[in-house]
Amino acid sequence: MKNFIFSALLFLLASCSSFNNSRNLSSTGGALDGTYLGAAKYKFGRKGPNRPAVRIYLHEIEGEKGSYNAVLLEYVNLLKMAPKYIASNKLPLVSNKIGYLNQITRKISIYKVTPTEDAMTFEMNPLRVKGDNIQADQVDNPRLLILSKGDNLEHPLEGARITQSNNSQPGEIYFPSEEDKRDHGVQYALAKFTYEKVKLDSTWRKTFLPGPYLSQYARKDDVVLELSQSGNIGMGEFKLNPAYADMSARKRRKMFTNPKSAFINGRYQAIEPIDGMFLFVKENRNERADRNVVGRVGLFIDIFDATKSLNQDVVELVLIDPNNPEDFHMYYEHPENGEGN
C-alpha cells in the first residue's frame, strides 16, 4: 500500500510549483531569496494533519536590502489529494464521478520580513490591504523567522524555524536539514519525496499571466475567469458559465476551491502595488464592488511546477484574504495556456 501511495504521488504532483534551494550561504551573500519546504507542528485535536507540510517563498524588496516579501502556505493532506489529481490529469471520466481537483493548499498568508538587531532573527509582520495599497501591519507580537547558526548550510533556511504569534498558527514551523533524522511527519516526507523524485519546482510568479482560468484543475469545459493584458493594464473578467446555469447552487459551490467563488461576475482592473502582488479593483469605480474580489491580494503561484521535468505549466491564481489565511479563492490556469498567452 505504501509503495502505491508513493507511486501515485509521483504522478500526483506533476502539475502544480519549486524546490530549487541547493544553495550555500557563502555563495548567496546571505540572501534568503527562494522557496523552502518545511514542516509545521500543531496541537493535537485540530482538523487535518497535526504536522502538515508548509512552504515559504521569499522575495527581496527592491530598495530595501535585507527585507523580503513572503508568501507562506500550508499544504492540504497530500494523501487525500492524490486520487483527485491522478483522475483530473489522466482519467477525466473518473473525475466526472469523484470530482476534479480543487484543493491544493489549506492556508495562505503574506508577510513583510524585516531584519532585527540580531542578524539571525527577522520579524514577520502581516501584509494588509489599505485602499489601493498593500502595507505591513506592525503588530505587537510578530512571528519571528530565526535562522540556524550552523555552518555549511545547504540553503539559507536549513535548520531555521518560524515562531507562533497567535493560537490559530502552528506552534512552530521548522525547515529540516538533510542530516536531520528526526520524524517531521508523513506530510513533509511525502512532499519532499515527490518534489525531489519528480524534480518539481514551486514558483511564485511575479508577472501577470493572461489567459483562461478554470474552476477546478484540468476541468477544461469550465472557464470562469479570463485574464487579459493591454500594455501595462491587466484586466480580469469573472464569468458565470452558462453550461452550469441549471445546476443547483449547492452543487455549483462545491465545484470551487472556495464556495464564494461560484457566483462572482464582473470586470476588474488589476493593479500591482507590490512586486508580484495584485489587487483587483472594479472597472467602474462608481459601481458596487464585489467584496469577494476587492480587498483581496492576487498571487500567481505554481505550487507543483513541472515545467522542467514534465513540460507541464499550470499556474494557480489565488485571491487571498490577508485577514483570514483560510479564506481564499483559487483559479486554475487552462493547461493549454502555457506561460500566459
Image (cartoon, rainbow, N blue to C red):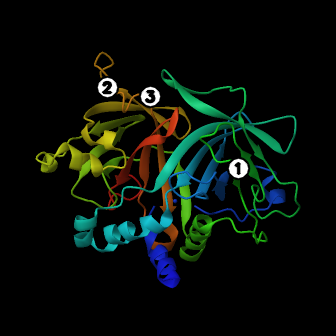
Could you tell me which residue is drawn at 22 percent across and 50 percent down?
251
Q: Is residue 44 above or below residue 321?
A: below
Q: Is residue 124 above or below residue 331?
A: above
Asked if residue 293 can be seen in this view, the reply is: yes
Label 2 and label 3: CA atoms lie apart by 14 Å
Q: Nearer the viewer, mark 2 or mark 1?
A: 1
Mark 3 secondary-structure assignment: loop
Residue 283's disc number? 2
The residue carrying pointer 2 sits among few (fewer than 14), some (14 to 19) or many (20 or more) residues within 10 Å by Cα, namely some
Could you tell me which residue is drawn at 61 percent across and 65 percent down?
188
Earlier sequence position, callout 2 versus callout 3 = 2
Residue beneath disc 3: 295
Does residue 141 appear left or right of residue 264 in this picture? right
Across and down, in percent, residue 74 comes to 55, 52
Residue beneath disc 1: 172
Label 3 and label 1: CA atoms lie apart by 29 Å
Mark 2 secondary-structure assignment: loop
